[in-house]
Amino acid sequence: MEQSMSLITLGVSDLARARRFYEGLGWQAGMTVDDEVVFFQLNGLILSLYPRAALARDASVVDAGGFAGITLAHNPGFPLDAEGNTRLG
């Protein structure tokens, strides 16, 4: 089986601000649900933004606030040099 990821949900403290951030990158929100969740379609992956307190409730955990740490990477389909810069030419 080929491993893949189809959905990443980020719990955010300010949904409107987070949406503006990603739209500022040029991403277009594909769908919103009752101003409670925003979805971005990203080339086979969906990124959803969801209020952190609601996400904690859904997961039956306490919303401790702050940043617990996570790294997401985009791996381009072209070579990088030793410093990780793209070679486009």
Image (spheres, rainbow, N blue to C red):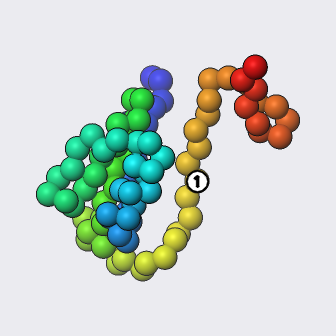
Residue 53 lies, with reference to residue 75, above or below; the image says below
Q: Residue at the location (83% across, 40% down)?
A: 83
Judging depth in this view, the residue of 1 and 10 nearest the camera is 10
Judging depth in this view, the residue of 5 and 84 nearest the camera is 84
SS at badge 1: loop
Residue highlighted by disc 1 = 71
The answer to whether residue 59 is visible is no
Residue 54 lies, with reference to residue 88, above or below; the image says below
Judging depth in this view, the residue of 33 and 19 nearest the camera is 19
Q: Residue at the location (42% across, 29% down)?
A: 43
The spot of residue 33 in percent (x, y) is: 17, 52
Q: Residue at the location (43% across, 78% down)?
A: 65
The answer to whether residue 69 is visible is yes
Judging depth in this view, the residue of 35 and 74 nearest the camera is 35
The image quadrant of residue 60 is: bottom left
Q: Is residue 79 left or right of residue 21?
A: right
How many marks the image carries: the answer is 1
The image quadrant of residue 73 is: top right
Please tell me how crowded label 1 is: few (under 14), some (14-19), or many (20+) other residues with Cα within 10 Å: few
Q: Quadrant of the C terminus?
A: top right
Q: Is residue 70 left or right of residue 4?
A: right
The spot of residue 8 in percent (x, y) is: 40, 47
Q: Residue furthest right?
A: 82
Q: Quadrant of the N terminus?
A: top left
The image quadrant of residue 70 is: bottom right
Q: Residue at the location (44% across, 56% down)?
A: 21
The spot of residue 7 in percent (x, y) is: 36, 42
Q: Residue furthest left?
A: 34
Amino acid type at circle 1 is: Thr
Residue 18 lies, with reference to residue 83, above or below; the image says below
The spot of residue 20 in percent (x, y) is: 38, 57
